[in-house]
Amino acid sequence: MKQLLAVLIGIIILFGCTKEDEILYEGKLDFSTDTITFDTVFASIGSITKTLTIYNNNNSDIFSNISIKGISAANFRMNIDGVAGNNQNNVLIPKNDSVFLFIEVTIDPSSNTTPYILSDSLIFEIGNNIQSVKLVAWGQDAHFYTPNTYGEVINGTDTTKIYYHQINSNQVWSNDKPHVIYGYVIIEPNAQLTINEGADIYFHQNSGMIVGNPFSSISGGTLKVNGTLNNEVTFQGDRLDSWYENIPGQWDRIRFIPGSYDNEINYAIIKNGTTGIHADTVANSNPTVTINNTIIKNMSSIGILGQGAKIVASNTVISECGQYTVACYIGGDYTFNHCTFANYWNYSIRNTPSILLNNYYIDANDNVQIRDLNNAYFGNCIIYGSLTTEFSFDKNENGIFNYHFDHSLVKIDPNINTNNANYTSVIKNEDPIFQNHLNNNLSLDENSPAIESGNFQITQNNNLLLDITGENRNDPPEMGAYQYID
């Protein structure tokens, strides 16, 4: 009898404990925020602490492995309910309860190698279920632009919110401190962003600038980049480590939405992004964007992408692009004078030539839609690179396809006949002999065939008497953006 009673008591205790202490091994946690932002600008070595509340809204206990992951993890320190450590295993979050996680960051803003933005994650592992909370901290003193509003994308019954930083009035960015963009900056219709000489613009990973609002039915928005010789405006990624100095694809692009026009980019250096400048269709006789004395380099995709746009570029150098240096796509109007396009991309295999000309597209129903290429003019230019031909003429015979290479050095399929109205005094398939294209020095060697091979009337008519470095051009001038200096 006593033995039976003991067995019954044991069973009761066993089942009682199992129910009371039930544990979820694939549970889901909730958090007080999805991003912890340390938005204090540090004047000296500083430390700031933020709190994250971890909620277990389940009816069972959860044990979670919690850690800090990322390349800047050493700057952060974590404490969970009094226990310190950046990697903690089997942290108990009781059922229908919560625990506090304290996170601290210490940054030395005097370091020239600290990124402007430290972006890492708190990782929560519950069995095979992994959740994360973003950590974002400012690494150096700068102007920061983070999402402050959102637009909505509606797809059937689904609505997606896209967050961005809104510029809805005229603003001027000076060169007093760097400007750091986290996410996208959108310049609203009826607003103008002016960037003064010497300003440095840094983009975090997958960030960019959009001129005009894709979520608005109102067109407009204007960008004016006012760099000067030896005091250019620079657009690049926010990683300052020397290893990232020439790495492409660190940020997205500068994009001009349809309806934005009369934008200007003067004396800028745009580097290490995905696409340098992306200009969409605009139904206006004015240029979408005018580009002068600008260098675009190390783009993982395209230097300048025009989609039915009107683009005017002079004294501009585009080099080292994973696809095209310039893509004149779905028609448009394009004028390039005294430009150098040199593509010796060596980060991967490049299958696309430097220049694409196109006058149509295939719509969602597989129908051909004609978009006239009204003009693609290259005057006193150099188009060269490492492929056997650096041109793609993607022409639909039912549309207009106007192009003209005027006093330019071109690397083209040798079987193409250049004895027609599309070509005037071109140098065909001769090496321009740059000073050192491996180090992106695209000024001309003394033996270059491009020296004194340009047309001075093109130079004079477009007020390009000075080259990209401020040197006086000769008569006849050199082809490309650089005047040869003896």
Image: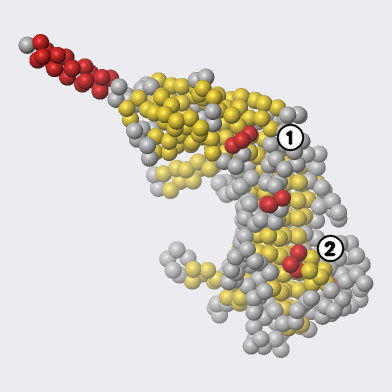
Going 76% across and 36% down the picture, which residue do you hit? 110
Q: CA distance from mark 1 to mark 2?
A: 35 Å
Sequence-wise first label, 1 or 2 = 1
In the picture, the disc for residue 262 is none
Of helix, strand and loop, which one carries label 1?
loop
Q: Residue flagged by tag 1: what amino acid is it?
A: Pro
Q: Which mark is residue 109?
A: 1
Question: Could you tell whether 240 is left or right of 21 in the image?
Answer: right
Residue 367 visible in the current orientation: yes
Quarter of the figure that contains the C terminus: bottom right
Quarter occupied by the N terminus: top left
Q: Residue furthest left?
A: 1
Occupied quadrant, residue 324 = bottom right
Can I make out residue 260 in this image? Answer: no
- SS class of the residue under badge 2? loop
Seen at 61% across and 35% down, the residue is: 74
Mark 2 is surrounded, within 10 Å at the Cα level, by few (under 14), some (14 to 19) or many (20 or more) other residues, namely many
**Residue annotated with mark 2:** 468
Q: How is the image coloured?
A: secondary structure
Question: Residue 66: percent from the left, percent from the top?
Answer: 47, 32
Question: In the image shown, does 239 or 279 lie closer to the viewer?
Answer: 239
456 horizontally vs 143: left or right: right
